[in-house]
Amino acid sequence: MGSVTAINTFSLRPGVARAEFEAFSRTQDRPNCLAFDVVQSFEVFVSKEDNSRVDIVELMTVTSWDEWVAVRDTAPALKSVVARFEELVDVESVYTVLTRRASDVED
């Protein structure tokens, strides 16, 4: 079984600027997540539409989704990152689609 790419979409809490989230992502979220071997890549995209229901789209490729969830939920290095994420993001708006590359499909 190959890698899993999670497509995460979400909105920011009222009053949180996209630039504030971008700074958090650049300095805390991405570097800390990418420090774990389970995370192969992590890209963040910011919506250009002011009235979009989605402010942020993240693409995170991991070797195993279950392993990533275990790391995310238990690693001491991520505790403050997760707490800050929850301060910035409307956690009720988080939607995740787990995908695989079409080329990974066996005939």
Image (cartoon, rainbow, N blue to C red):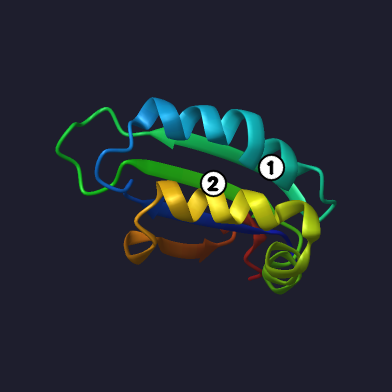
For the point 45% across and 35% down, the residue is 21
For the point 64% across and 29% down, the residue is 27
Residue 31 drawn above or below residue 68: above
Mark 1: secondary structure: strand
Quadrant of res 16: top left
> Residue tagged by mark 1?
41
Residue with the most extreme left position: 51
> In the drawing, does residue 77 fall left or right of residue 24?
right
Indicate the amino acid at tag 2.
Leu
> Which mark is first along the chain, 1 or 2?
1
* Nearest the eye: 89 or 39: 89
Quarter the C terminus occupies: bottom right
Q: Position of residue 96 (x, y in %)?
A: 45, 63
Q: Position of residue 100 (x, y in %)?
A: 59, 60
Residue 95 drawn above or below residue 18: below
Q: Is residue 101 visible?
A: no
> In the drawing, does residue 70 fall left or right of residue 14?
right
Indicate the amino acid at tag 1.
Ser
* Nearest the eye: 102 or 8: 8
Question: Residue 81's mark?
Answer: none
Question: What distance separates the C-alpha of mark 2 from that of mark 1?
Answer: 8 Å
What is the crowding at mark 2: few (fewer than 14 residues within 10 Å), some, or many (at least 20)?
some
> Residue tagged by mark 2?
59
Q: Position of residue 63 (x, y in %)?
A: 76, 60
For the point 73% across and 72% down, the residue is 70
